[in-house]
Image (cartoon, rainbow, N blue to C red):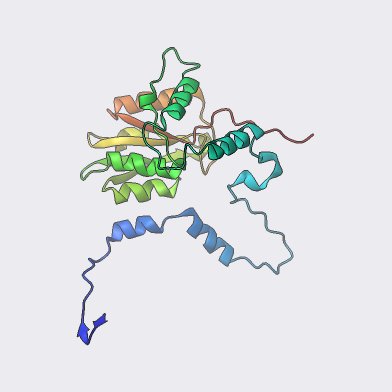
Amino acid sequence: MEDGGRSTQWRFAAPNPTLAAAGERSIQKALLQVHACLDERGPRPVIPLSHGDPSSAPSFRTAPEAEEALVAAVRSGEYNGYPTPATGLPARRAVAEYLSRDLPYMISHDDIFLTCGGSQAIETVMSVFGQAGVNILLPMPGYPKHEAHAVFHRMEVRHYNLLPERGWEVDLEAVEALADGNTVAIVITNPNNPCGSVYTYEHLAKVSIAFVQSLVTFFLILFVVIEVICLLPC
């Protein structure tokens, strides 16, 4: 860079190859590569199976109760500032009460952490676990953002396979072989994205036993869907 006739050198360090590779793994990039190969002038129609946002479909309209609650909150003027632990308390209490309905115990609101979508939740959890020398087990195939944040927070990523011939169940033998004393967590995606499978209670019980035997403390469960109800037009 030139500054008044003087040459100034930027002192940015060389990029971390591992971090750069993790950042390149994204669903959006894969979709762009696929779309670049499409011939839109061809006779065959293109069915966008990669479209994961259902909001464009009329059957997935926001419930009127949710719309009215949002409008009332905006008009009240009570939520115009940045949220604090105190302002989020009613929401965390409501979530804790809802999740405790079918449990023999009550979940504390102090155990509820609200995030702006799953991406922020992944980033937050990975930042808690991240430190040099630890590893995390991720499913293969899996969601690229898990690996990107794990590498960013200095964790070694170890992949365990999902078995297509068994409905994409977890390879329990691989988990037991990969986990060691430095494994801080294992990620389970259920219902599975991108495979679309839903694990049975029996398989989840076997997975939990394998994790306990491997001395892994934390299980991160992604894509848990609770009572998603859609009113379809008749």
Q: Does any portion of residue 33 appear in the rendered image?
A: yes
- Residue at image x 27%, y 64%? 15
Residue 10, quarter of the rendered image: bottom left
Position of residue 58 measured from the top left corner of the image (x, y, whole percent): 70, 43
Q: Between 16 and 2, which is closer to the camera in this rendering?
A: 2
Q: Between 26 and 4, which is closer to the camera in this rendering?
A: 4
Quadrant of the rendering where the N terminus is positioned: bottom left
Horizontal placement of 193 versus 233: left or right? Answer: left
Q: Between 44 and 189, which is closer to the camera in this rendering?
A: 189
Residue 227, quarter of the rendered image: top right
Horizontal placement of 109 versus 156: left or right? Answer: right
Position of residue 197 measured from the top left corner of the image (x, y, whole percent): 54, 36
On screen, 29 above or below 156? below
Q: Does any portion of residue 174 appear in the rendered image?
A: no
Horizontal placement of 155 versus 172: left or right? Answer: left
Horizontal placement of 133 versus 23: left or right? Answer: left
Q: Between 38 and 107, which is closer to the camera in this rendering?
A: 107
Outermost residue on the top side: it is: 104
**Callout count:** 0
Residue 7, quarter of the rendered image: bottom left
- Residue at image x 20%, y 84%? 6
Outermost residue on the bottom side: it is: 5
Position of residue 191 measured from the top left corner of the image (x, y, whole percent): 52, 35
Quadrant of the rendering where the C terminus is positioned: top right
- Residue at image x 64%, y 34%? 63
Position of residue 149 measured from the top left corner of the image (x, y, whole percent): 35, 48
